[in-house]
Amino acid sequence: MNINTMALEGKKIRIKDIANLAGVSPGTVDRVIHNRGQVTEENREKILNIIDELDYKPNLLARSLATKKTTCLFLFVPNTIPQTITGKLLITVSKELPAKSTIIMSM
């Protein structure tokens, strides 16, 4: 498995895959992604380059399942506000929030 193969196959990239490509443990990749703990500058750069080349984005849904936490946003909009404005508000809010980790409910 190499970076070019994974990118071309459109395969879902996992932390484990990045770790294999970088020759480090998944824990090291996790520390780089979340910017915590100590990682050598050499490994940090290697991991960040792989993440960039693969256009890796953390799976927020998987994270919420693993941590058993999700984000809910409740919007209480009075009936006196026209639906066109309410619709625009919901669209704007949903564009700004991470789609897979936030549940938006309006009432």
Image (cartoon, rainbow, N blue to C red):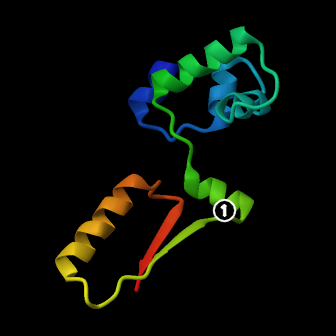
Determine whether, in the image, residue 97 is placed left or right of residue 66.
left
State the image quarter where residue 66 is shown.
bottom right
Q: Is residue 66 above or below residue 39?
A: below
Quarter holding the N terminus is top right
Question: Residue lying furthest front in this view?
Answer: 80
Determine whether, in the image, residue 4 is placed left or right of residue 20.
left
Q: Residue at x 71, y 65 (%)?
A: 68
Residue 2 appears in the picture as rendered = no
Nearer to the camera, 85 or 90 = 85
Label 1 sits on what residue type?
A: Leu
Q: Estimate the x, y position of residue 19 in percent, counting from the top left.
A: 69, 26
State the image quarter where residue 7 is shown.
top left
Q: Is residue 2 above or below residue 35?
A: above
Nearer to the camera, 86 or 43 = 86
Nearer to the camera, 21 or 94 = 94
Determine whether, in the image, residue 102 is placed left or right of residue 37.
left
Quarter holding the C terminus is bottom left
Residue 33 appears in the picture as rendered = yes
Determine whether, in the image, residue 78 is placed left or right of residue 75.
left
Q: Is residue 89 above or below residue 79?
A: above
Label total for image:
1
State the image quarter where residue 34 is shown.
top right
Q: Residue at x 78, y 27 (%)?
A: 25
Q: Estimate the x, y position of residue 80 in percent, counting from the top left.
A: 25, 89
- At mark 1, the secondary structure is helix
Classed neighbour count for the residue bearing mark 1: other residues with Cα under 10 Å, few (<14), some (14–19), many (≥20): few
Q: Estimate the x, y position of residue 35 in percent, counting from the top left.
A: 70, 30
Residue beneath disc 1: 65
Q: Estimate the x, y position of residue 24 in percent, counting from the top left.
A: 75, 21
